[in-house]
Amino acid sequence: MKTVIEKTIKGFETAIVSENEESWFVDLNTGMGEAEYPKADFSLDEAIEDQVNWKME
């Protein structure tokens, strides 16, 4: 079960960030869907930064 995290991402104010025990989920609400980041490999801020930077490429 995922829990939504209250997190505002500049430039992506409608983004949805959530988590479960093993992963972070970042959906910038751009139509590309949700990206999953394992907590063992990413902090929450790293996951968000990776997703934002991927979208800018």
Image: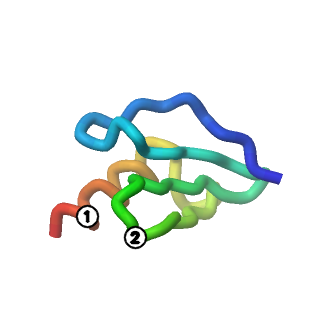
Q: Quadrant of residue 31?
A: bottom left
Does residue 42 sit above or below 57 in this rendering?
above
The residue at which mark 2 appears reads as: 32
Mark 1 vs 2: CB contact within 8 A: yes
Kind of element beneath mark 2: loop
Does residue 53 sit above or below 44 in this rendering?
below
The nearer-to-camera label among 1 and 2 is 2
Residue pictured at 75% horizontal, 50% vertical: 2
Q: Nearer the viewer, residue 21 or 25?
A: 25
Q: Earlier in the sequence, mark 1 or mark 2?
A: 2
What amino acid type should be assigned to the residue bearing mark 1?
Lys
Q: Which mark is residue 23?
A: none
What amino acid type should be assigned to the residue bearing mark 2?
Met
Kind of element beneath mark 1: helix
Residue pictured at 35% horizontal, 36% vertical: 13
Where's residue 39, x and y in %? 63, 55
- Left or right of 19: which side holds 16? left
Does residue 33 sit above or below 49 in this rendering?
below
The residue at which mark 1 appears reads as: 55
User: Could you classify mark 2 by the number of other residues whose Cα lies within 10 Å: few (under 14), some (14-19), or many (20 or more)?
Assistant: few
Where's residue 10, x and y in %? 27, 35
